[in-house]
Image (cartoon, coloured by chain):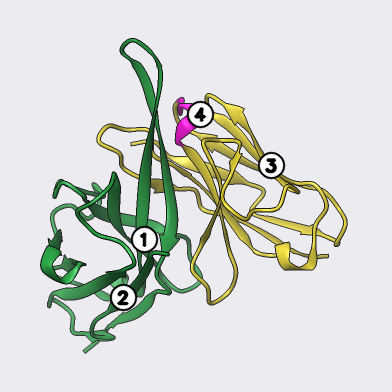
Amino acid sequence: QVQLQESGPGLVKPSETLSLTCTVSGGSVTRGSYFWNWIRQPAGKGLEWVGYISYRGDTNYSPSLKSRVSISAATSKNQFSLNLSSVTAADTAVYYCARVGRTTVTAGPDNYYHFYNMDVWGKGTTVTVSS
Amino acid sequence: EIVLTQSPGTLSLSPGERATLSCRASQSVGSSYLSWFQQKPGQAPRLLIYGTSNRATGIPDRFSGSGSGTDFTLTISRLEPEDFAVYYCQQSASSPPAFTFGPGTKVDLK
């Protein structure tokens, strides 16, 4: 059973870089058709997808955060990490890591579609941006 | 970028009642790319429905999803006390996939 655990500083100063790590147990960040995601949630607000790194090492980021976000993987430690630069108070949130599994269904020649299941989540870690 | 809107913002119901939650997309979303999540206070979200109508592992059959194109619905046939929570829809229709969430519907006790 795959489990995810976020870790990192709970307090970051404005203009600095927020760095978080997600440790994966019971699975591998390089095996299977999985995408390893970061999602955040300001207090009392909704969910915002931040980005992912795929099992192949490809990354994709939210357009609104793309200029400040970097996600990388440390495969030997079975971890993936988030770096968010130039933070402000608006980046204060609970940060979750989550796994997305992809299932491909072939409906005919050159006709296929995917299911993407965000099915495993960490418990979340609170990050506050304040001086 | 596909934008999701959810209605109503809050749904006040009693246990045993039927809940109908709506999710509308700004452009057509393939049925396989629409999911629903439940979130309770202090907890991470939990996947309920994927591919518009497929229940995730361990999800009771009182939860069902339907819809197509730009309009999708999550139905809870008979509310149990543990179902009072916030529900989010999510889409992943682009290639490579990018995920967006709706703003959520809170189901609270009437």
* Chain ID at mark 2: A
Mark 4 falls within which chain? B
Q: Which chain is yellow?
A: B
Residue B64: mark: 3
Tell me the colour chain A is drawn in.
green
Q: Quadrant of residue B97?
A: top left
Disc on the earlier residue, 3 or 4: 4
Which residue was labeled with disc 2? A6
Residues at marks 4 and 1, common chain? no
Q: CA distance from mark 3 to mark 2?
A: 31 Å
Q: Secondary structure at mark 2?
A: strand
Q: Which residues are magenta?
A: B28-33
Residue hosting label 1: A98
| Residues at discs 4 and 2 both on one chain | no
Residues at discs 3 and 4 both on one chain: yes
Are discs 4 and 1 less than 8 Å apart at CB? no
Q: Residue at x 53, y 24 (%)?
A: B69
| Quadrant of residue A69 within the rendered picture | bottom left
Number of numbered callouts drawn: 4
Determine the chain carrying the residue at label 1: A
Q: Is there one chain holding both mark 3 and mark 2?
A: no
Residue type at tag 2 = Glu
Which amino acid is tagged 3?
Ser
For the N terminus of chain B, give its image quadrant.
Answer: top left
Measuring from the top left, give residue A38's x and y in whole percent: 30, 61
